Image (tube, rainbow, N blue to C red):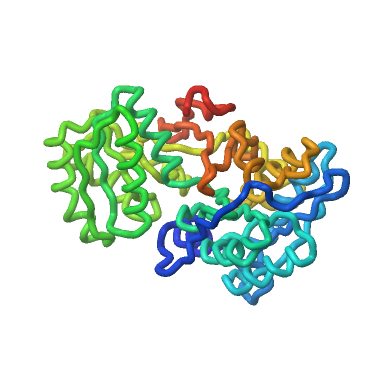
Amino acid sequence: MISRSLLLRVLTMCSVLWLAACDNLNLPNTGTGPSINTRDAVPVALLVPGGSADGQQNALAQSLENAARLAISDLDGVAIDLRIYNTTGTASGAQTAAIEAVDKGAKIILGPVFAESANAAGVAVASKGVNVLAFSNNPAIAGGNVFILGQTFDNTAERLVRYAEQNGKGQIFVVNGRSVAEEVARDAITRSVSGSGATLVGATAFDLSQQAVVAAVPNIVSQVKSSGADAVFFTSGNEGAMGFLAQLLPENGLSPTVTQYVGMARLDIPPQALAQPGLQGTWFALSDPALNNRFRARYTAAYGSEPIEIAGRAYDGIAAIGALVKQGDANALSKAALTRGSGFVGVDGIFRLRNDGTNQRGLAIAQIRNNKVVVIDPAPRSFGGAGF
């Protein structure tokens, strides 16, 4: 089992802008990349956080490997020579593994998980022209030869802001806790609003302690009401302040039936949160649930346990590599190929990689209704249509 603490590290700590001194790549990339022979099995290095005494990280590594192998079994007419390298979950381990992998012929690197490790791996092989598809969602380490596969705050904010504007909820107020992660999410909302027809009518922040949240509630209610907002965007998740806010704000006169609540986090996690009265009617974004549920069922049938939350990123990386190699182009793994506008289809829906190393994913809009998750705007199945 993966502990909640490790999962939170994967989903938040390691994947937001918390690196105090990170050698952000932004290195030139000609777009050529390593040449491959598409008639032979393509050597792909998978860097996972195994090989240490940490059982949690070893379990995480196994789940990622399982997902990658499941993806390989789904490829049609493409042979992948998957080579597993343990990083021990450290930047130095990732650097060593990346160099060894490329020296032994790897044409692309899939992983590692943690942001500092992905950055180290990318720097280590940049001069070789080998691209890295990291499992992080930290934009700080994207660029040059490093692409991130994790869903970013900007991706989530763009989808939610656009939907709010299109549905008459374009007067937006932002409420965030004072933490690096929540401030990054706040900034993503602000950027999305400025690039849309919506209006940012106000914002407020609170310290992350139970006492501070309780004390902040009257001020939040007052500011939201005086701003004329018809939607409030929350950056907190249920593991943080959102549980308190969802209870206390309605009790103090900010009703979700009048002012639309919108969450940047997955507010259906943990499942028992769905029963909370103050979350009824709240909107949030999530990956294509039909495709994700299908993946989880197939993974469980194959391996006897459920995949961890980010295992689908390993599947998506292999799916993208396979789709490119199948075209028979010797430059299939170049930057130019990886950033094709049509993108790819993965277990969480469509996605595409951008020139700056970040990504864009097709997300659904869901609402908590009668203690259940109801998709109110499906995830797009192609780029350029509704949802983008």
Give the quarter of the image for residue 85: bottom right
Residue at x 83%, y 47% (from the top left corner):
37
Residue at x 64%, y 62% (from the top left corner):
127
Residue at x 47%, y 47% (from the top left corner):
152
Closer to us: 152 or 354: 354
Closer to us: 104 or 93: 104
- Identify the image quadrant of the N terminus: bottom right
Closer to us: 5 or 349: 349
Residue 52: tell me if it is visible: yes
Q: Residue 220 in the image: x percent, y percent?
A: 18, 45
Closer to us: 157 or 177: 157
Give the left or right position of residue 118, taking residue 285 as reference. right
Q: Residue 180 in the image: x percent, y percent?
A: 35, 59
314 over 336 or under it: above or below: below
Residue at x 45%, y 42% (from the top left corner):
268
Q: Residue furthest right?
A: 39
Q: Residue 198 in the image: x percent, y percent?
A: 28, 30
Q: Residue 386 in the image: x percent, y percent?
A: 49, 23
